[in-house]
Image: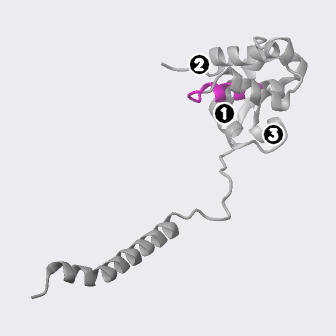
Amino acid sequence: MVEPIDVIMKALPAILASVVIVGVVAVGAYLVIHKSPQAETSRTLADTPAVIDGQPTTCAELFGEACSFDLQTEYNQWGHAIDSFVHSGVLGPYARSVGFAPAAKLSLQACGVSSTAGRTVFDFNDLALTDHPDASTTDLFPFWNASRQFLCPAVP
């Protein structure tokens, strides 16, 4: 009489080989299906115009170069109000000294940072100092504070 354990032990290598083959095929199929195209290395958004000084102006036109994904997102979301906001005078003397486009960019970046959970004024300062290494926290605070109050207030 053949013991059941003997039958299992003899069939075990074939069973394990089958499981391995099925696993390799499944992983291969998953990778083929979920593989992102090699050519698409960056995300892009529509460059939606906002009215600046009475003229439809895209993000790229305002800042003189293609906007990053984050800046384009911010411009598309809050750009419609950036003209009147920057010209309102609430941003202080540093905004006047750097000019409209840099002040607009700082304001949009403040909105982007503040609308991201877990990010703070310190994150905004780090981002702002990339383009404005001479700026002090006193220079940058009006952008953080006023933008969050007037340009992109959080809706509860």
For label 2, the crowd category at 10 Å Cα-Cα, with few meaning under 14, some 14 to 19 and many 20 or more, is: few
The kind of secondary structure element at disc 1 is: helix
Q: Position of residue 68 (x, y in %)?
A: 73, 42
Residue marked by disc 1: 74
Kindly indicate the quadrant of the structure image that contains residue 102. Answer: top right
Label 1 sits on what residue type? Glu
Residue 153 bears which disc, if any? 2
In the displayed structure image, the side of residue 97 where residue 137 appears, left or right: left
Query: Which range of residues does the magenta coloring cover?
Result: 106-118
Kindly indicate the quadrant of the structure image that contains residue 70. Answer: top right
Q: Residue furthest bottom?
A: 1
Q: Position of residue 67 (x, y in %)?
A: 75, 42
Label 2 sits on what residue type? Pro
Q: Earlier in the sequence, mark 1 or mark 3?
A: 3
> As rendered, which of 88 and 137 lies closer to the eye?
137
Whether pointer 2 and pointer 3 mark residues with C-beta atoms closer than 8 Å, the reply is no
Residue marked by disc 3: 61
